[in-house]
Image: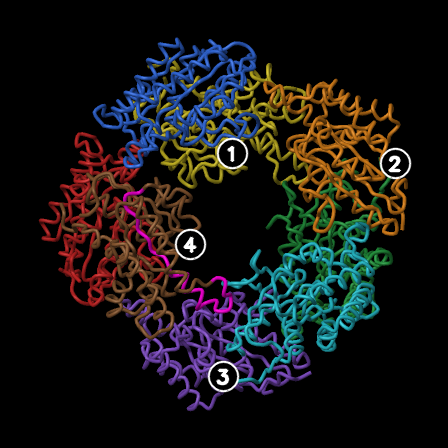
Chain colours: A brown, B red, C purple, D cyan, E green, F orange, G yellow, H blue
């Protein structure tokens, strides 16, 4: 288990991370972490490692792209002094190109995505001890699908960024693909993006495995 | 992993099981299983064993005691023809004795509890292939606390019933006790009964371990 | 233009037809026809052929399968004595197989679909002068997609039923495919099923062309 | 078809244009264009000419008169850099004279209307490649009706303004009059101003015909 | 003043009479008489003739035609044993012919109207000491307007019925016409049917003058 | 009739005047004058003297005392340039002394009341052609009741102010007293302050009689 | 202290007793006893005599008269088998005579009141060990006020009934009168009937003193 | 009775004091004092000592710790010039240590608590004639319970502060303990913190006894 005693773990991202978390603080009583994978990760940490005293914070915000993260990076990430930082961004960067193809100022193309993500991670490395980069995903089994193919390219950028900055890396698309071998996307998300409980569990499991969570710990 | 291909798993109980599940069917789209341990169990099953095609049904109902279960047992359990049946009942049977001590007709004392539970399990054994009995619990670390002590006695009845009918058995109180060694009850439930996300995870983990769920399965 | 003076045109189907129509009558003041393709068809008829006095009725109901249509066919179709009948059913018959694969009693497989649809059209032919069969559709450009492929098979059943009973026929999948050559599905429907305004216009145009609506009539 | 690839089409006007559009942007996902003629026009454009990539924006605002348009012209029209601009204004300029005859500061009389409209179109010509002027209307078949007669005079001003600036021109009153030969006003709008679905279709058809929309395009 | 001590005055009609009255009783505390002309009449009676002890009851129901009155005449009129009965019906009988011209079963044509009204008044005469018949109206100044002309014919039927049964008679159309000489219909009702406060005052004044209300009584 | 063509009539006061009027303007469409005596006065003026074109404005505000009027007098009265001004204030000045006797800073005692009212009327005389002062009232028949007696003294101040500034004067208490000879206060207002429809009619009649409204005008 | 161990105390009455109690049972968790004097009485009993185990039930119903009590006496009183019964009824019996003087069927005059109350108490004596009769009241200090005088007469009937059946008796009017010597009615209830917190405390104190509650018990 | 004529009594604290009081003033009509012990204390004072004219103000605010009190002490306490000041704070200071153990910046540890409370009382002594310090509490009977033990230590700080500044002192924990000898905590508060009506009565009684309230005063 990679997390150590009294560490603080901060998640940032879009609506998949947000999931109706408490604004603005993203921690505290009353399901302040939202109802998605962040809450699942935290619940497993707290119930399995109660002795560690991990503090989890959720700073996800619906609709965000990497451009939006940049605008709030100082306040919502750097000023938070977290030991761990988990970032999953890019779905809206891609999706707007496909659902609103003619409103071009809402699109974040891949070079801008790469550049901004790189810049964010570079500054975050100075404050956070450990960073986890999660790829964006599209719960579509056909790799030739145009939006899936684009998302894969953004995922590749995340992978390269993780390698460059030597952060931990989670291939969420690969995690979903395993399930998609057996189940149709609609079992995880009608719109292939916003996961139901099954889909968030896929994300939480991938996260917990990445930090060497011990499922069999008593 | 004890569950087999195409099996149906039915949960019944009180508000801890219910958790705002869809009425009346307790299965289907749109978080029909509610937001508690039943949904967690199902999400881990579906995302880890998508090839098994497990069908989960939630028939929990807020405020129920074993008396209420008896009244709807035929329709909500026997007629459902499930392969697996999980029962967690007894919290309200005890709680009313402590929060409404003078409204005695709302109390279900231990002999009635034992008798009715026994009767329910006896009839269920004829239709369900496997039964799991979960104890009621009280998230209170002091075993000398009056309500905790009473709940422990009801839990003991569940254990004896499980042994008599040779069903699977989950000691939920023991599961919570492990966490309570490190954390105060308020981290799991302000009222020591209705769990937050952490508390439901404790229940889900206990359940999944009982059915030999393989956490490390790829 | 195939509709004649004073004729009554009745639509039946699922949520795509329903679109928040007034219950139970499905006609009258205040957007009683809902906000989807039925309302579009009616608006074009009324504003272009005000002299014809066409009466449009919407009997769509969200979530319906062909099984549900059968249950209400006598009351909602035969008793209505409409001159024209338009039927679009099958999306839910297929979708449940893909989003709820393990709740099998909600699936309507293709043989039952064919048989029930045939029976409905046979009885309707005795009361309605003209029948229009619209295929179900899935706004997915990849014909190898499992759900798209299944939907295509159901669409083929509709085509065969139309031929057998010599009704008018609308290939809605083909209509969407034309748009999908240029636009990604998300521009028409996030979940590939419930169309936005663009998608309902595709359906309305296909319908109006089928009845030889004269777009250039003054 | 007059619109060309990648052009932007902006609508401005009062509640008939607004129709509950998303504020402030008037474009994007989730029926951002409202539920009136603007949405209809856009849906026909997108579903028939998906290859053109037309971007439609709705800047209508309920209750507006030409005075209100002037106050927001810079921000809501000139700064938008649209290729096409469609303007329909004047109904409230007239209506207040008839429903609130004694609150005179709410009235916009014809000379102010002429002057302000002229000024707005003059400035817009410098940024927009094409302008469409739509007359205000009153869904009242009796030309001797006082408010209808006044509205006709405002419509005449629009026509003269269109001629002076050589813009496209739509006589919406004439479009409604065609329907009124066969149907009573109440079939289009109880208050003779806010159209139901039929009435908005009249407006959309007039608009689409004016830009040489090809209804029979495959 | 025609009303005598301790008499009961019952109003029946459509939405113009109803005006959000208390259901089902139509009398009592808390604006039970609604907010239209019935409440105005009652308020003037109570505040000017407090010594008379008049009891006012409102049995108006939105959307009613003479057909609907017939269906509830026994319960809502005859069983009420009122000394006075005021009836205003017919607007919906006519309006549906104009706003829903093709839904013919909702139309009440003039012969049915005459017949049913006659029958209702004939039976009411046996229980009520005094009856007041108010014409339906349409707040449209042009007598050649189709709906106005039709409404005038229905008003004529009311007049003939009043003469035949020797009841009191109020020509509400004439009362509105006096105001329409100076003001446009929109000052009284946007849809020419549902009056604002001004319009209800026109009705109340006509009613009070008909019963010889003494406006200058101290 | 004292009001002349094209005059503007402004009402100011507390909750009895306010009655849910539109904020901030207090005039316009959709029952902007509220539902109390101001609306009644206006409705009788408009429906009886439509040729005069009177413009009525309601600036009442719930909870106001004479102190609050002073704070907004410039903006809500003087800047409005009305020809007529009607003022009814004082109920809350007195009531707080009786329902909140120990919260003394909320009380406006009689000398402050006299002084502030005098000052307001003095300044208003410079802009308004005619002023009407209405007394506060308490719908309590017993003149020895403490609050009624106090209210009478405040009413006497109003009378003296009216005489000093030679304004029109309405003794609303006297108007209510006439009704109270026959009816118990609860028929007009449960709390003896906020009138029901009957009570507002008493106020409207007193007002209309004061301006020589001709009730029998055709 | 008159109440003994394990006794059940049932209250019945009108809105003053009801105070938003839980329907239908009137006991249990979550402020089931409402927010008025019944809850106050119970709270003082439970917090001062926790060892007694008193069970309190609230069966008050808004708007009730003695006629309404009779209709539900068997179910809501006799079938409840309470040891103690407290009855406060009569306010609505009187009030309707004053706020709705012409709706005579809603009035319960004094002879009917006496008769029905007598009958109810006679039957209740067979099941309840102790009965407490509370007078109705009117928070009006002037004994010559018509409604107060009438209420006093109904109070006198209660007193005579109490004497006849030898029940405990509470003169609530006298209790309020003590406060009214110092405070104006508006400090207790704007409408002189529905008490605020101060007023309910007056009732609770009178009740507790009647049962010899020991305020200084440790 | 320690309170004297015309004195003002101000309460400050957390949610137990707040209880939905009116913001911001905390006094006035319509249950402005909230629904907890403050309202109970005031109601007993007003109904028993109406001649004293006590003015009660509630400045409680949900979630407050002693840190929050310090931030608003000048405005909400010192500027209020109350004769009496009652302070109950500390529950949240302790609770957050137990329900959110890892969000340490929300914890107010005992030294900070002691210091800040001391500072607040020192400044308040200069303006208030009398101060009452109430301990925080935890409705848990087991003194060895961790949170109860901590709360006891904070209560001890309150006691020492009261002694140091010679203020009145209320041991609320002791008051609850008396009841807990007979009843289980759940009868007073499910979460052991927010009291139901019984629990607030315990607090109100303790308060009133401390100021020598005469329960038997006529």
E50 left or right of G132? right
Q: Which residue is mark 4?
A: A62
Which residue is more in the foreground, G186 or A212?
A: A212
Q: CA distance from mark 4 to mark 2?
A: 59 Å
Stretch in magenta: A82-106
- Residue F194 pos. (x, y %): 67, 34
Tell me the subunit letter for badge 2: F
Which residue is more in the foreground, H124 or G174?
A: H124
Checking the image for residue H47, the label placed there is none
In this view, C207 is above or below E196:
below
In this view, D193 is above or below H108:
below
H104 left or right of B4? right
Q: Which residue is mark 1?
A: G14
C49 left or right of G195? right
Q: Which residue is mark 3?
A: C132
- Residue G91 pos. (x, y %): 57, 30
Residue B73 appears anywhere in the view? no
Looking at the rendering, in which quadrant would you find the C terminus of chain C?
A: bottom right
Which is closer to the viewer, label 2 or label 3? 2
Label 4, secondary structure: give it. Answer: loop
- Residue B114 pos. (x, y %): 16, 44
| The image quarter in which residue H192 lies | top left
Q: Which residue is mark 2?
A: F129
Which residue is more in the foreground, B210 or A177?
A: A177
Label 3, secondary structure: give it. Answer: strand
Q: CA distance from mark 2 to mark 1?
A: 54 Å
Q: CA distance from mark 1 to mark 4?
A: 51 Å
- Residue E159 pos. (x, y %): 81, 63
| The image quarter in which residue C185 lies | bottom left
Which is closer to the viewer, label 3 or label 4? 4
Tell me the subunit letter for badge 4: A
Tell me the subunit letter for badge 3: C
């Amino acid at each position: 288990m990679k997390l150590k005693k009294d560490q603080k773990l901060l998640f940032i991202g879009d609506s998949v991370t947000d999931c109706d978390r408490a604004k603005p603080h993203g921690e505290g009583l009353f399901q302040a972490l939202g109802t998605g994978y962040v809450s699942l990760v935290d619940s497993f940490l707290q119930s399995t490692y109660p002795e560690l005293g991990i503090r989890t914070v959720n700073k996800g915000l619906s609709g965000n792209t990497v451009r939006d993260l940049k605008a709030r990076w100082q306040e919502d990430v750097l000023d938070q002094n977290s030991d761990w930082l988990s970032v999953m961004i890019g779905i809206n960067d891609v999706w707007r190109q496909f659902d609103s193809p003619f409103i071009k100022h809402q699109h974040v193309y891949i070079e801008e995505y790469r550049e901004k993500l790189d810049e964010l991670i570079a500054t975050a490395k100075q404050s956070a001890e450990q960073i986890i980069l999660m790829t964006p995903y599209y719960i579509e089994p056909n790799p030739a699908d145009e939006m899936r193919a684009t998302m894969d390219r953004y995922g590749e950028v995340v992978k390269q960024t993780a390698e460059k900055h030597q952060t931990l890396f989670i291939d969420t698309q690969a995690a979903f693909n395993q399930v998609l071998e057996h189940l149709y996307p609609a079992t995880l998300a009608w719109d292939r993006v916003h996961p139901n409980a099954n889909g968030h569990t896929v994300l939480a499991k991938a996260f917990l495995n990445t930090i060497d969570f011990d499922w069999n710990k008593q």
